[in-house]
Amino acid sequence: MSHDMKQLTNHYNAYIHDGIPPLRKLGYNPTQFLEMVHAAGDAVQATKRLLASPRHTSYGFQRLYALGRLVDSVEFAALLPWFEPLFTADEREEARTRLILHEFPVDAKLRTAMAMPPDWVEEDG
Protein backbone atom coordinates (compact mmCIF):
# COMPACT_ATOMS: atom_id res chain seq x y z
CA MET A 1 0.00 0.00 0.00
CA SER A 2 1.40 3.39 -0.97
CA HIS A 3 1.99 6.07 1.63
CA ASP A 4 -0.88 8.12 0.17
CA MET A 5 -3.31 5.19 0.35
CA LYS A 6 -2.21 4.39 3.90
CA GLN A 7 -2.78 8.01 4.87
CA LEU A 8 -6.19 8.01 3.18
CA THR A 9 -7.08 4.76 4.96
CA ASN A 10 -6.12 6.39 8.26
CA HIS A 11 -8.36 9.38 7.45
CA TYR A 12 -11.25 7.02 6.64
CA ASN A 13 -10.73 5.08 9.88
CA ALA A 14 -10.73 8.35 11.85
CA TYR A 15 -13.83 9.61 10.00
CA ILE A 16 -15.77 6.45 10.81
CA HIS A 17 -14.63 6.25 14.43
CA ASP A 18 -15.29 9.96 15.04
CA GLY A 19 -18.87 9.44 13.90
CA ILE A 20 -19.63 6.80 16.52
CA PRO A 21 -20.02 8.90 19.72
CA PRO A 22 -22.91 10.98 18.29
CA LEU A 23 -24.65 7.77 17.25
CA ARG A 24 -24.27 6.35 20.73
CA LYS A 25 -26.00 9.46 22.08
CA LEU A 26 -28.93 8.58 19.81
CA GLY A 27 -29.06 5.08 21.28
CA TYR A 28 -27.18 3.22 18.57
CA ASN A 29 -23.91 1.50 19.45
CA PRO A 30 -22.46 -0.14 16.31
CA THR A 31 -20.99 -3.12 18.17
CA GLN A 32 -21.23 -5.53 15.23
CA PHE A 33 -19.52 -3.07 12.91
CA LEU A 34 -16.73 -2.45 15.42
CA GLU A 35 -16.23 -6.21 15.72
CA MET A 36 -16.07 -6.39 11.93
CA VAL A 37 -13.49 -3.58 11.86
CA HIS A 38 -11.39 -5.43 14.41
CA ALA A 39 -11.62 -8.69 12.45
CA ALA A 40 -10.96 -7.03 9.08
CA GLY A 41 -8.11 -4.86 10.31
CA ASP A 42 -9.58 -1.46 9.50
CA ALA A 43 -12.81 0.36 8.63
CA VAL A 44 -12.05 0.32 4.89
CA GLN A 45 -11.88 -3.47 4.76
CA ALA A 46 -14.99 -3.76 6.95
CA THR A 47 -16.85 -1.40 4.61
CA LYS A 48 -15.73 -3.44 1.59
CA ARG A 49 -17.11 -6.59 3.24
CA LEU A 50 -20.44 -4.89 3.88
CA LEU A 51 -20.62 -3.72 0.27
CA ALA A 52 -19.75 -7.14 -1.12
CA SER A 53 -23.30 -8.49 -0.75
CA PRO A 54 -25.45 -6.88 -3.45
CA ARG A 55 -28.64 -5.29 -2.16
CA HIS A 56 -28.02 -6.63 1.36
CA THR A 57 -28.38 -4.03 4.06
CA SER A 58 -26.78 -4.64 7.42
CA TYR A 59 -28.44 -4.27 10.79
CA GLY A 60 -26.45 -1.08 11.26
CA PHE A 61 -27.70 0.38 8.00
CA GLN A 62 -31.28 -0.42 9.02
CA ARG A 63 -30.75 1.22 12.43
CA LEU A 64 -29.31 4.35 10.81
CA TYR A 65 -32.24 4.41 8.40
CA ALA A 66 -34.69 4.20 11.31
CA LEU A 67 -32.85 7.05 13.03
CA GLY A 68 -32.85 9.16 9.87
CA ARG A 69 -29.04 9.10 9.90
CA LEU A 70 -27.99 7.40 6.66
CA VAL A 71 -25.59 10.31 6.23
CA ASP A 72 -23.58 8.52 8.94
CA SER A 73 -23.55 5.19 7.10
CA VAL A 74 -20.43 3.61 5.63
CA GLU A 75 -22.36 3.52 2.36
CA PHE A 76 -22.45 7.33 2.32
CA ALA A 77 -18.84 7.58 3.51
CA ALA A 78 -17.71 5.40 0.60
CA LEU A 79 -19.27 7.92 -1.80
CA LEU A 80 -17.51 10.97 -0.39
CA PRO A 81 -15.16 12.17 -3.14
CA TRP A 82 -12.12 12.31 -0.87
CA PHE A 83 -12.53 8.60 -0.03
CA GLU A 84 -13.26 7.50 -3.61
CA PRO A 85 -9.77 6.00 -4.23
CA LEU A 86 -10.37 3.50 -1.41
CA PHE A 87 -13.32 1.82 -3.13
CA THR A 88 -13.96 0.25 -6.51
CA ALA A 89 -16.58 1.57 -8.91
CA ASP A 90 -18.72 -1.50 -8.13
CA GLU A 91 -18.48 -0.88 -4.38
CA ARG A 92 -19.45 2.77 -4.81
CA GLU A 93 -22.34 1.80 -7.08
CA GLU A 94 -23.59 -0.71 -4.49
CA ALA A 95 -23.39 1.97 -1.79
CA ARG A 96 -25.29 4.46 -3.97
CA THR A 97 -27.95 1.88 -4.87
CA ARG A 98 -28.62 0.98 -1.23
CA LEU A 99 -29.02 4.62 -0.29
CA ILE A 100 -31.29 5.38 -3.24
CA LEU A 101 -33.46 2.34 -2.48
CA HIS A 102 -34.01 3.89 0.95
CA GLU A 103 -35.00 7.23 -0.61
CA PHE A 104 -31.84 8.94 0.62
CA PRO A 105 -31.04 12.12 -1.38
CA VAL A 106 -27.51 11.02 -2.27
CA ASP A 107 -26.55 13.83 -4.63
CA ALA A 108 -27.95 16.59 -2.42
CA LYS A 109 -26.14 15.21 0.64
CA LEU A 110 -22.90 14.84 -1.34
CA ARG A 111 -23.15 18.48 -2.48
CA THR A 112 -23.60 19.53 1.15
CA ALA A 113 -20.60 17.46 2.24
CA MET A 114 -18.42 18.76 -0.60
CA ALA A 115 -19.16 22.34 0.43
CA MET A 116 -17.36 21.63 3.72
CA PRO A 117 -14.56 19.10 3.09
CA PRO A 118 -12.34 18.02 5.97
CA ASP A 119 -9.29 20.22 6.58
CA TRP A 120 -6.93 17.40 5.63
CA VAL A 121 -8.29 17.35 2.06
CA GLU A 122 -6.58 20.70 1.41
CA GLU A 123 -3.51 19.74 3.44
CA ASP A 124 -2.97 16.40 1.69
CA GLY A 125 -3.79 18.07 -1.62
Image (spheres, helix red, strand yellow):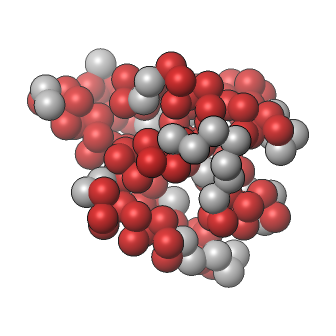
Q: Residue 24: image x %, image y %? A: 59, 77
- Would you say 3 lies left or right of 83 here? left
The part of the image, by quadrant, that contains residue 26 is: bottom right
Answer yes or no: is residue 115 visible: no
Q: Please say whether residue 90 is visible from this viewpoint.
A: yes
Q: Position of residue 3 (x, y in %)?
A: 12, 29
Number of on-image labels: 0
Q: Position of residue 6 (x, y in %)?
A: 19, 37
Q: Which residue extends farthest front?
A: 53
**What residue is drawn where x is 59% and y is 69%?**
22
Toward which corner of the image does residue 119 lie, by quadrant?
top left
* Above or below, comparing residue 4 to residue 12 in the picture: above
Asked if 76 appears above or below 107 in the picture, the reply is below
Q: What residue is shown at x 61% (from left), y 69% (from top)?
A: 23
In this view, 41 is above or below 47? below
Instruction: Answer left or right for 11 relative to 62.
Output: left
Residue drawn at (21%, 37%) of the image: 7
Where 57 sits versus 87, above or below?
below
Q: Quadrant of the N terminus?
A: top left
Q: Name the residue at the right extreme.
A: 103
Q: What residue lies at 61% left-to-right and 25% top-to-bottom?
A: 93
Q: Is residue 27 left or right of residue 119?
A: right
Residue 23 placement, left or right of 87: right
Q: Which is more toward the observer, 106 or 40?
A: 40
> Residue 107 appears at what percent x and percent y?
74, 25
Could you say which is closer to the camera, residue 63 or residue 120? 63
Q: Quadrant of the C terminus?
A: top left
